[in-house]
Image (cartoon, grey):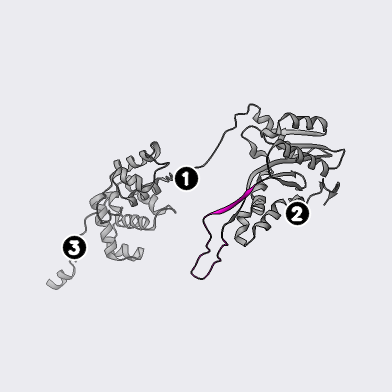
Amino acid sequence: MVAAAYLGMRTGRPKKPLEIVDADREKLNLIARRPKSAQSMAMRARIVLSCGQGMTNSEVARKLHITGATVGKWRRRFIEFGMDGLLDEPRVGAPRKITDQQIEDVVTKTLESMPANSTHWSTRLMAEETGLTQNAIVRIWRAFGLQPHRVENFKFSKDPPFVEKVRDIVGLYLNPPDRAIVLCVDEKSQVQARNRTQPILPLAPGVPARQSHDYERHGVTSLFAAMDVASGVTISTCYRRHRHQEFLRFLDEIEANLPPGIEVHLIMDNYGTHKVAKVRGWWTRHPRYHVHFTPTSGSWLNLVERLFGEVTGTLCPSRQSHRGSSVGESHARLFGPAQRESETLHLDCRCRFDPRKGSTTF
């Protein structure tokens, strides 16, 4: 009788009853079923919901394929702390040494003040100013996306007829007039011709390429270019100076390269040499030329400027000197006959009129 009574007794520690209110049950169901929930939080919600149905720890463990210790842990946490008990406890470690007020002071100083005798804040200057470490300043700036050393330029055009000029030039690009040539004209002034005082020592294993810090300046040159919008043909030449006299010579060269009897539309910026009296007289003597000026502070509308970066890299000897070119070769490239020949850039494969040949190309 005693053995039978002992075998019928319930073994193990008694479990505290787990009761779930309707509001918590709704939140637990949402966490357990939502696809974007973290897997750990979803599993804890399923454990609590299963325990709330009256299941034992072992039954919940077999159902969810986890250990009984895990079920007991989250059952106890939910009974003691409710929904907050399902969250992870704060990790161990040293307490924060930088307060929110110090972080706010760093951000405020970075955005609203400038250091003395300096153009911008650096991590070292800000660390000396606030009493924090340089690494702390780096972390704060990185967290708030602050980069005081970077500066971007912008400029707004205040030209009153800005919209009208933009529509006029964009219209020429998108829909050039029939039997007419649209040219973008611009100048690249002060293209420097430089060469190192000593030959550049080539790269060697374990030794970088070496060059002298000083250089010889062999004067400057100005690049004049006119690009046909339709065909991409360019008419370019170099002059030693950048005045209205050189611009008039370049206009004569354009006139010599274009076929007669065709209207010509020139797109130019508001440079001073484009508006002097002698240049205006040249327009009067050549009535087939129609001038379209870009808005003030809006010369970016002139498409030929996009080519100057590549063309300047080809012409400038300072960039070519790394290839071992001599001073004489540099001057030959700048002022020799080869530079007075136009370069054809194939922008597309559509049927275009070639002003150099006076015919249509495909």
Q: Where 143 sits versus 73, above or below?
A: above
Q: Position of residue 142 (x, y in %)?
A: 40, 49
Q: Position of residue 311 (x, y in %)?
A: 67, 51
Counting residues from the N terminus, which is met first, the one under dot 3 or under dot 2?
Answer: 3
Q: Secondary structure at mark 1?
A: loop
Q: Amino acid at mark 2?
A: Ala
Identify the residue at horizontal 34%, vertical 44% (top origin).
126
Q: Amino acid at mark 1?
A: Arg
Judge by depth and name the residue closer to the eye, 58 or 198.
Answer: 198
Q: Which residue is mark 3?
A: 13
Counting residues from the N terminus, which is met first, the one under dot 1 or under dot 2?
Answer: 1
Judge by depth and name the residue closer to the eye, 41 or 132.
Answer: 132
- Between tags 3 and 2, which lies in front? 2
Q: Secondary structure at mark 2?
A: helix
- Magenta stretch, main secondary structure class: loop
Query: Would you say residue 199 sits in the magenta stretch?
Result: yes
Q: Where 32 sits versus 163, above or below?
A: below
Counting residues from the N terminus, which is met first, the one under dot 1 or under dot 3?
Answer: 3
Q: Secondary structure at mark 3?
A: loop
The magenta segment is 198-221
Query: Would you say residue 87 sits in the magenta stretch?
Result: no
Q: Which residue is mark 1?
A: 150
Identify the image quadrant of residue 48.
bottom left
User: For the residues marked 1 and 3, what is the alpha-carbon distance in whole angstroms?
Assistant: 66 Å
> Do the residues under discs 1 and 3 have CB atoms within 8 angstroms?
no
